[in-house]
Image: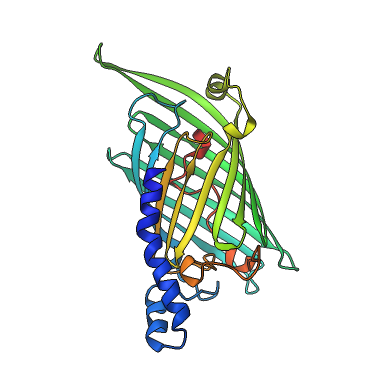
């Protein structure tokens, strides 16, 4: 959380300054040119480029305590993209492909690849999606791989995603005193449910609440004797769209204070789903600002980025 606050201070202050300057000088051509250069002009889904749907992510994270006792901190550097395979002219039907590659500071590899479909209803106030993916990640003492599937429901105010994953999981224990490595292999089936929503009055924010249930060995062992309030088991996340091409994310996996992460996301342009940013204005005109779902036909799928490990918490 300290890293999240530090990064937030570094990138929010310039955005606040720009927001104030832009509001005081709305008619100056120089300000308009700077907006365009800094990806601060909203983009329509028809004008969105391939590069705008591609981003670089830098993660500083801590693995949940239930997975490893040592070497729990890790950094992950990744690139993610989501691109249309086919999209109808009216934006109501979209077939898409998404994927990502990454590496950790231990030079371990990570990658994922997936396909999905989204349908926007005729009234344009609901969108439904379905998809499948395959993911592999190698951390220093933790390796997992396997397929996953998801369904999603997007409204003008919320995003609800239900996912299912089937992982082969291997945890390596380093017995330094005896100079050997012990490999623990198991199957892990996980079901996740996530809700995303806008914070009141702040259309450039997106908060997340999620929960993962485990159905096989690693899940039963992990939650045996786990007592307490249900909220202690939730995943918590927050995304801040600071500029059109810059966002900051952070949160916890598996309970408040457990498995903390902070992620800086830099896009190669302004994606259409970044409808609102801090630099556009601090407060919205309504308590909850409705979003245009056509802008989300090619938005990243929750938990399907290569730098998201919540499903193995």
265 sits left or right of 201 in the view? left
The structure residue drawn at horizontal position 58% and vertical position 21%, both measured from the top left corner, is 226
Residue 260 in view in this figure: yes
Left or right of residue 25, residue 116 in this image: right
Identified at 41% across, 56% down, the residue is 265
Residue 308: x and y in percent read 47, 44
Q: Name the image quarter holding residue 269.
A: bottom left
Question: Which color mode does the image show?
Answer: rainbow
Q: Eyeballing the image, is 196 above or below 269?
A: above
Whether 272 is drawn above or below 103: the answer is below
Residue 51 visible in rendering: no
Residue 185 location (% of width, % of height): 44, 22
Compared with residue 171, is residue 145 higher up or lower down, i.e. above or below? below
Residue drawn where x is 65% and y is 62% of the image: 288
* Residue 252: x %, y % from top left: 49, 40
How many marks overall?
0
Q: Residue furthest right?
A: 123
112 and 67: which is toward the camera: 67
- The one nearer the camera, 4 or 304, is 4
Is 109 rendered above or below residue 232? below
Q: Position of residue 278 (x, y in %)?
A: 48, 66
Residue drawn at point x = 75 percent, y = 68 percent = 123
């Amino acid at each position: 959380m300290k890293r999240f606050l530090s990064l937030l201070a570094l990138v929010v202050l310039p955005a606040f300054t720009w927001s104030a300057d832009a509001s005081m000088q709305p008619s100056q051509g120089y300000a308009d040119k700077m907006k365009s250069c800094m990806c601060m002009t909203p983009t329509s889904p028809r004008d969105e480029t391939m590069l705008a749907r591609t981003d670089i992510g830098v993660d500083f994270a801590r693995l949940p305590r239930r997975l490893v006792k040592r070497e729990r901190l890790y950094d992950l550097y990744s690139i993610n993209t989501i691109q249309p395979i086919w999209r109808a002219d009216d934006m109501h039907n979209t077939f898409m492909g998404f994927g990502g590659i990454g590496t950790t500071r231990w030079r371990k590899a990570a990658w994922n690849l997936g396909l999905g479909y989204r349908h926007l209803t005729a009234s344009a106030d609901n969108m439904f999606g379905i998809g499948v993916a395959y993911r592999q990640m190698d951390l220093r003492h933790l390796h997992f791989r396997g397929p996953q599937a998801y369904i999603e429901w997007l409204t003008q105010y919320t995003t609800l995603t239900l996912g299912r994953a089937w992982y082969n999981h291997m945890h390596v224990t380093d017995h330094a005193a005896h100079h050997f490595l012990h490999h623990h292999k198991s199957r892990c089936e996980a079901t996740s449910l996530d809700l995303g929503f806008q914070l009141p009055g702040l259309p450039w924010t997106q908060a997340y609440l999620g929960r993962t249930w485990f159905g096989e060995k690693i899940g039963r062992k992990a939650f045996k004797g786990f007592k307490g309030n249900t909220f202690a088991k939730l995943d918590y996340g927050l995304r801040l769209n600071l500029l059109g091409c810059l966002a900051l994310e952070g949160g916890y996996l598996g309970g408040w204070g457990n498995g903390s992460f902070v992620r800086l996301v830099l896009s190669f342009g302004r994606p259409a789903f970044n409808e609102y940013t801090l630099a556009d204005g601090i407060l919205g005109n309504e308590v909850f600002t409705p979003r245009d779902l056509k802008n989300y036909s090619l938005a990243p799928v929750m938990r399907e980025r290569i730098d998201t490990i919540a499903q193995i918490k």
